[in-house]
Image: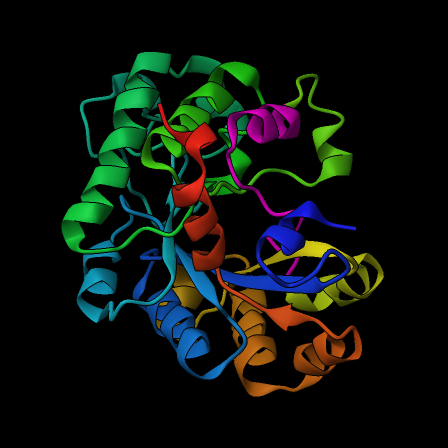
Amino acid sequence: MSELTWRLGLGESATAVIVTADDLGLCHASNIGVFDTLATGLATSASLLVPAPWARQAAALYRGQDIGVSLAITAEHELLRFGPITHAPSLLGGDGGFAGSVADALDHADLDEIRRECRAQLERAVLYGFDVSHLAAHHNALVTRPEFFDIIFDLAQEYRLPLRLLSSPQDALLGFPARTLAKNAGVIVPDRVIDSTGQGLRSKLEEISDSLGDGVTEIVIRPAEETDELKAFASDAAQRVDDLRLSAREATLKALLRDHDATLIGWRPLLELARRSPASMI
């Protein structure tokens, strides 16, 4: 049974699913793919990469959809570079953009610089006009070590936003009780997360089928239109295109969710809980 689905008014035994299209703003192909599956497919939410090259175009296309912010301190694509929007020398890799991997970023990042950068990314999304629905960490960079987790956790509390964390099996390996801390502070988090990063949604269909049950499950996808631009820089271009196909063009995922009697929701119902929760106020 799930306390979260009960609080959402769905019932303790309900199966609720958020389908989040990540990497909005990364490139033009991602913007097309994300807004396509939000409009015609299964995606119920998206996450914006504020420092990425096409974030401003994403803002121009925004029409009030359920969109949160994926706080970034890495830029993993060798041929598509972007970096901090604040003065943050410790967050730079060797080529002037963000570090290319989480391990590299966390090895030399200054905590004060990360804190300023993350706040600036969130505030810029608000300045762009987004009604931010949730927080996430790009590549989970800010949720795997306690000193970095504190930064995104504090922002979630201050802005009263729900937060994506690792699923419970992974959370148990962190060495600190992230989910317990969130619950005690009144920060709303989905019960489990299934992330297709680096593998593609199709490879996760069996895991989704096996994992769906009571509670709120977030499925994270990265849909993109097939373009020469995407294929030129993204080693996982085929998987991103297939994520769009599965979430907006094929019936496979839709049928799977129907078979599990899953209710599709966005992050906004969780946002409403966060805003009503006195425990989440500082």
Taking 267 as reference, is 150 above or below it? above
In this figure, what is the number of numbered marks?
Answer: 0
Q: Which of these two is toward me, 183 or 211? A: 183
Query: Does residue 100 appear anywhere in the picture?
Result: yes
Which is more toward the observer, 192 or 27? 192
Magenta residue span: 178-200
Nearest to the observer: residue 216 or residue 30:
216
Residue 29 x %, y %: 36, 69
The quarter of the picture where residue 173 lies is: top right
Tell me the quarter of the image containing the C terminus: top left
Residue in the image at 35% along x and 74% along y? 32
Looking at the picture, how far across and down is residue 204, in whole percent?
73, 61
Q: Position of residue 84 (x, y in %)?
A: 26, 32
Q: Residue at x 34, y 22 (%)?
A: 114
Looking at the image, which residue is at 56% across and 29% down? 182
Query: Does the magenta run of residues contain 190?
Result: yes
Indicate left or right for 1 with 174 as reference: right
